Amino acid sequence: MSITLNPDVEAKARQKVDAGLYADVDTVLLEAIELLDRRDKVERLRALIREGEEGEGIPYSPELLAEIEQESEERFLRGAIPKPDVCP
């Protein structure tokens, strides 16, 4: 795949390479994309936290934990893939 970078973006990426911080422009762009992915994940998590703070709380109990574990086991046995927000 070939893309054309805006001259300002290309100049900034080349500065990083010329400074010896990255091997090539591709590596600069890959790092930038990975940082954007992390930022997006953080924003999703913050939104979920806000949603949880605004929602009705569920009191913790051993029964609740057992129910969560049972649901997790059933999803695992069905081959369901966990949401990326709950994976380390």
Image (cartoon, helix red, strand yellow):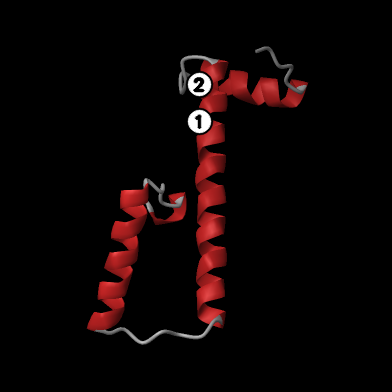
Q: Which quadrant of the figure has residue 65? A: bottom left
Task: Describe the element under mark 2 as helix, strand or loop.
Answer: helix
Residue sitting at x 45%, y 85%: 57
Q: Above or below — where is 25 with respect to 72?
A: above
Residue at image mark 2: 27
Q: Position of residue 35 (x, y in %)?
A: 52, 40
State if disc 2 and disc 1 touch (CB < 8 Å). yes
Q: Position of residue 4 (x, y in %)?
A: 74, 16
Q: Above or below — where is 52 with respect to 43?
A: below
Q: Amino acid at mark 2?
A: Thr
Task: Choose between 36 and 69: the one closer to the eye.
Answer: 69
How many marks do you count on the picture?
Answer: 2
Q: CA distance from mark 1 to mark 2?
A: 6 Å
Does 81 sit left or right of 64 as displayed?
Answer: right
Residue at image mark 1: 31
Q: Position of residue 46 (x, y in %)?
A: 53, 64
Task: Describe the element under mark 1 as helix, strand or loop.
Answer: helix
Task: Choose between 30 and 74: the one closer to the eye.
Answer: 74
